[in-house]
Image (cartoon, coloured by chain):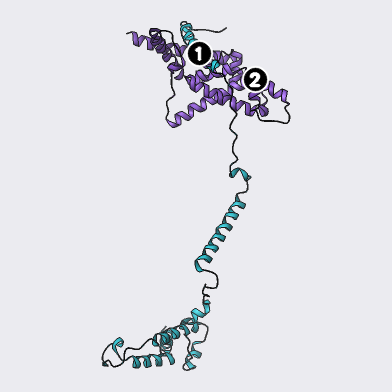
Chain colours: A purple, B cyan
Amino acid sequence: MRETALAIEGTMTGSPDLTMQERERGAQELLAFRGRVFCLCLGFAGNAADAHDLAQETFAKALAHFDQDRPDNPQAWILRIARNTCLDLARRRKTRGVQIAVFDAAAVDWSTPESHAGREDEIRVVRKAIAGLPRRLRDVLVMREYAELSYQEIAQALRISSGTVMSRLNRARQAVLHFYREEHHGKNT
Amino acid sequence: MEKIPEGWSEIAALIQEEKNKALDDFQRRGFVPAAAPRRRASLLSLFKPGMGPALAAMAASLLLAAGLVSFWLLRSGWRNVPAAPVLNDILQGSILYRAAGQPEAKSSEAGPPGPSAPYFTAWAAAGLERTAIAAGEPIDPSAPVEHADPGEVRQKIGKVIRENTLERLLARFREIHNKEA
C-alpha cells in the first residue's frame, strides 16, 4: 500500500505549496478509495474491464488536480470525479453509436454450469434494469449498492440533501424490482 | 430510517455477488494509477486572447509578401516589368480627350494639326513597314485593298496619316453635330 502510494505520488503535479509528506499523505488517502471507485465504475459501466479503465482514468484525473483542488472531503471528491468520468464515457459511446455492455460474463466466475446460466440471466436482468433508470435515480442506486456509501456520503458527493437521497433511492429500488419481476413473470409464463 | 422494498434483498444479493467477484479480480491484479497524460501545448494556445487583429494584420502582410515574391519570380526581376504608359499618354490618342481641353473654334481654325495620335500613328507606320508583296504580280486597280498595289496603298495611307485626315474629319463631324444640337 505504502509502495503504491509512493509510486503514484510521483504522478501528482508538483506544487511548491505542498510538501513531500503532504503529497504522499494525499496519494495514500486517495488510494484508500480505489475499491469504492472501482465498484462505482462497475455499477455505471456494467463490466469489469471498462470499470478498471474508468478507475484508472479517475485516479489519473484526481492525482493531476489534487494540488489545485485540495478537497475537504477526498472521498466525495474522487467519487464525483469517478461518476463524471463514467458519464463522460457513456456520452462518448452514445455519440459514437456504441452500445454499453449491460453484462460482462467474464467479470463473474460461477461455480457450476447450471447455476452459471441461471445467475447470469438474473444479473443480466438487474443490470438492464439499472441501466434503464433515469440518471438521477441511477446515480443514487449505484453509489449505495455498488460503492456502499451512506446517505450522508451520497448527499455530499452529489451535492443534494439526505432526504432527496432517500427518496430517490426508494424510487430506484422500486423501479428495479418492478422490472425484475416483470421479466421473471414474462419468462415463467 | 431506510425503507427497503420487499424482495429487494434478492437483487441486493445478486449485485453483491457480481461486485465481490469483480472486486477480487481487481485487487488480485493490483492497481497502480497511471499518470495523467500531459496536455500538449497547441500552437493556438501560444497566442493570448485579444490578439485577433494583430494576427490578421500579420497574416495579411505575409500574404502580400508572398504575392510580391511570386510576382518577382514569375517576371524574373523587376527590370523586366514593362513601364506602364501614363494614363494621359494613352488618352492623348483620343481626339475627344484632346478636344475636351481646347475651345472648339480654336481647333478648327488652327488648320491641319500635327500628329495628335502618336500611338495610332506608330501602329500604322509599323504596319506599313511590313514586307511588301512580292513584286511582279499583276495589279488590278479594281481589286480590294488587300490585293491592290502595296506601294500605292502605302502612299495613300501615309498621306491620310500625315494630313490627319481622319481626325480632321472627326472634328468636322463633331462641329456639325454640335451645331445641330
The quarter of the displayed image where residue A160 is located: top right
Residue situated in front as seen by the camera: A119 or A140: A119
x, y percentage for residue B132?
35, 89
Q: Please state if B140 lies on the left or on the right of A123 as rendered.
A: left
Q: Residue at x 58, y 32 (%)?
A: B37
User: What is the number of the mark on residue A48?
Assistant: none
User: What is the number of the mark on residue A3?
Assistant: 2
Mark 2, chain letter? A
x, y percentage for residue B1?
57, 7
Asked if disc 1 and disc 2 are in contact, CB closer than 8 Å, the reply is no
Type of the residue with mark 1: Lys
Q: Is mark 1 on a helix, strand or loop?
A: helix
Q: Is mark 2 on a helix, strand or loop?
A: helix
Residue situated in front as seen by the camera: A178 or B136: B136
Task: Classify A131 as above or below B72.
Answer: above
Label 1, on which residue? B19
Type of the residue with mark 2: Glu
